[in-house]
Image (spheres, rainbow, N blue to C red):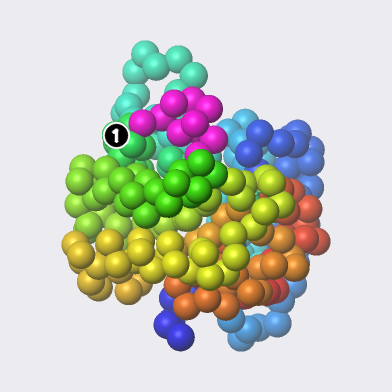
């Protein structure tokens, strides 16, 4: 066992309304917990237009005996500011109370054709501004079937290491999200996930052994209250990045309880 504090993160993707996002945040933040129990860090990633409302709900609910929930965004611009219609800058996210930001989610890599290089520049922008980047990597089903998983995830991670260097991972989080497991109900087995997590940690260790020991590597892809405990029991799985199951407060709390 290591002393890496676990993380349970909820990516709300493009779901919900201002009202439902506020209610969900309220339900999480109102959850009481027994003092002294090893709680994970909890982070939610609402859509941009809901960030401010969620922040206010979380701040109002914050008190000693309730769950501390941090705020993150689902994307950021590589640009500082300027004529970039539709883009959202790192400073704007900090203004909204965000501490974390997702970079390289497969739905952006695939659906919006974000390249490894663009993802690396987003990671750099986030870390440079004091946001904690959560770098997502993962292979598609044809890539897994062709036994290219290692090659793909190392290429995705390698692009960031090349641009940013290993030291920029000191405050970063990694997430292994096999594309074939996202939203499909086909969760990777704990052993499949552990194998990739070990590989990723080993790759970080090649540039900085100390950071590799401390970095949290989350698993994402059809995590739910029933399968979370077995996944989190693996030595290199430091928590989960949860999509669908994070939209239901009870189910998300079951995952938190599995830590
Ligand atoms: P699901 O948990 O819905 O499979 O989504 C995972 C994910 O993409 C989190 O970023």
Position in image of residue 116 (x %, y %) = 33, 36
Q: Residue at x 51, y 41 (%)?
A: 142
Residue 255 located left or right of residue 39:
right
Graded by Cα atoms within 10 Å as few (under 14), some (14 to 19) or many (20 or more), the crowding at tag 1 reads: some
Residue 13 within the segment the image draws in magenta? no
Viewer-proximal residue, 198 or 249? Answer: 198
Regarding residue 17, the answer to whether it shows in the image is: yes
Find numbered disc 1 in the image and state the secondary structure of the residue it sits on.
helix
Quadrant location of residue 117? top left
Residue 76 located left or right of residue 154:
right
Dividing the image into 4 quarters, which one contains the C terminus? bottom right
Which is the main secondary structure of the residues drawn in magenta? helix
- Total residue callouts: 1
Q: Residue at x 73, y 42 (%)?
A: 21
Residue 27 located left or right of residue 81:
right
Position in image of residue 167 (x %, y %) = 22, 58
**Residue range of the region highlighted in magenta in the rendering:** 106-115
Q: Residue at x 71, y 52 (%)?
A: 185
Residue pushed farthest front? 146
Regarding residue 171, the answer to whether it shows in the image is: no
Does any atom of ligand 1 lie closer than 8 Å to the CB of label 1? Answer: no
Position in image of residue 115 (x %, y %) = 36, 31
Say which residue label 1 marks: 117
Position in image of residue 91 (x %, y %) = 39, 36
Quadrant location of residue 156? top left
Seen in the picture, residue 70 relative to 227 is either above or below; the reply is: above
């Amino acid at each position: 066992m290591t002393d890496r504090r676990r993380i349970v993160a909820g990516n709300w993707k493009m779901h919900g309304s201002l009202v439902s996002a506020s209610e969900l945040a309220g339900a999480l933040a109102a959850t009481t917990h027994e003092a002294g129990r090893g709680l994970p860090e909890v982070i939610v990633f609402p859509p941009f237009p809901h960030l401010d409302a969620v922040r206010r709900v979380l701040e109002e609910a914050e008190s000693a005996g309730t769950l501390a929930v941090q705020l993150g965004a689902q994307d950021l611009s590589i640009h500082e500011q300027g004529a970039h219609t539709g883009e959202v800058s790192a400073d704007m996210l900090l203004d909204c109370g965000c501490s974390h930001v997702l970079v390289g989610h497969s739905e952006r890599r695939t659906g919006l054709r974000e390249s490894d290089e663009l993802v690396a520049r987003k990671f750099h922008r986030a870390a440079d501004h004091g946001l904690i980047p959560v770098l997502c990597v993962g292979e598609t089903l044809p890539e897994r079937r062709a036994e290219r998983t290692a090659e793909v995830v190392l290429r995705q991670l390698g692009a960031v290491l090349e641009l940013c260097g290993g030291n920029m991972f000191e405050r970063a989080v990694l997430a292994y999200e096999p594309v074939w497991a996202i939203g499909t109900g086909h969760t990777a087995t704990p052993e499949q996930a552990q194998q990739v997590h070990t590989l990723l940690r080993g790759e970080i260790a090649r540039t900085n052994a100390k950071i590799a020991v401390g970095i949290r590597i989350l698993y994402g892809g059809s995590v739910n209250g029933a399968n979370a405990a077995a996944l989190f029991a693996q030595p290199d799985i430091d928590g989960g990045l949860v999509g669908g199951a994070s939209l239901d407060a009870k189910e998300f709390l079951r995952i938190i309880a599995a830590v």
